[in-house]
Image (tube, helix red, strand yellow):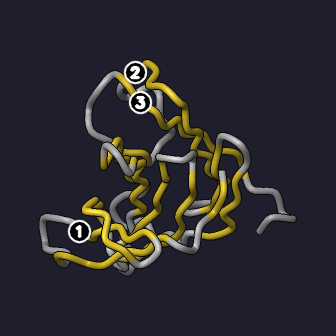
Amino acid sequence: MQQLSTLSLVELSGQTEFSQARSEVYFDGKPSGIVVPGKLLEAAFRVDEDCYLIFTTDDVLFEELLTITLISREQGVIEIAHLGGEYASGTFENASADKESVHFQFIDDVRWTVKISRSPHLRIPFLSDPRGVKRPSGLKTYMTFSTDPVSESVK
């Protein structure tokens, strides 16, 4: 995967008491018609020729929620997951990527990894994800989450 600087967001609707902000994805300054949850683009990664992994937040102090969205230029939004919780504050930092995964820090002293599969695989709701990951119910996923303690050299 490759981190991108050519992808941007334009806010379409602001956050309300009951919903996240919504923004349109722009590729090289051109609108795509793809709308994702979130206001601030934290990072974007190119998965392959068609798919992108986008990390967004809503800029909410003391209850920041990281939204991770897998999109396709052809199909639009493929999958969405949220990372965070009530009264949990986090800062998205130290993002890096390898061939199939993105690694980053957000909440607590853990290093998060999200691995992207080329085809969907089985997910067991309530058991498959680390604490803090929230996503719509379903049995198939392209994104697999894991955590590792952060070493002192990474902090």
Closer mark to the observer between disc 3 and disc 2:
3
Residue at the image position 27 percent from the left and 39 percent from the top: 136
Residue at the image position 66 percent from the left and 63 percent from the top: 95
SS at circle 1: strand
Residue type marked 2: Ile
SS at circle 2: loop
Marks 3 and 2, Cα distance to the nearest angstrom?
10 Å
- Which residue lies under the disc numbered 1? 22
Q: Quadrant of residue 4?
A: bottom right
SS at circle 3: strand
- Which residue lies under the disc numbered 2? 124
Establish if 112 lies above or below 61. Answer: above
Residue at the image position 41 percent from the left and 78 percent from the top: 29
State which quarter of the image contains the C terminus. Answer: bottom right
Give the image location of residue 145, x and y in percent: 54, 39
The answer to which of marks 1 and 2 sits earlier in the sequence is 1
The answer to which of marks 3 and 2 sits earlier in the sequence is 2
Quick check: marks 1 and 3 in contact, CB under 8 Å?
no
Give the image location of residue 65, x and y in percent: 38, 64
Q: Residues within 10 Å of mark 1 (few under 14, many from 20)?
A: many
- Which residue lies under the disc numbered 3? 141
Marks 1 and 3, Cα distance to the nearest angstrom?
22 Å
Residue at the image position 47 percent from the left and 46 percent from the top: 50
Q: Residues within 10 Å of mark 3 (few under 14, many from 20)?
A: some
Q: Nearer the viewer, residue 51 or 113?
A: 51
Give the image location of residue 135, x and y in percent: 33, 42
Residue type marked 3: Thr
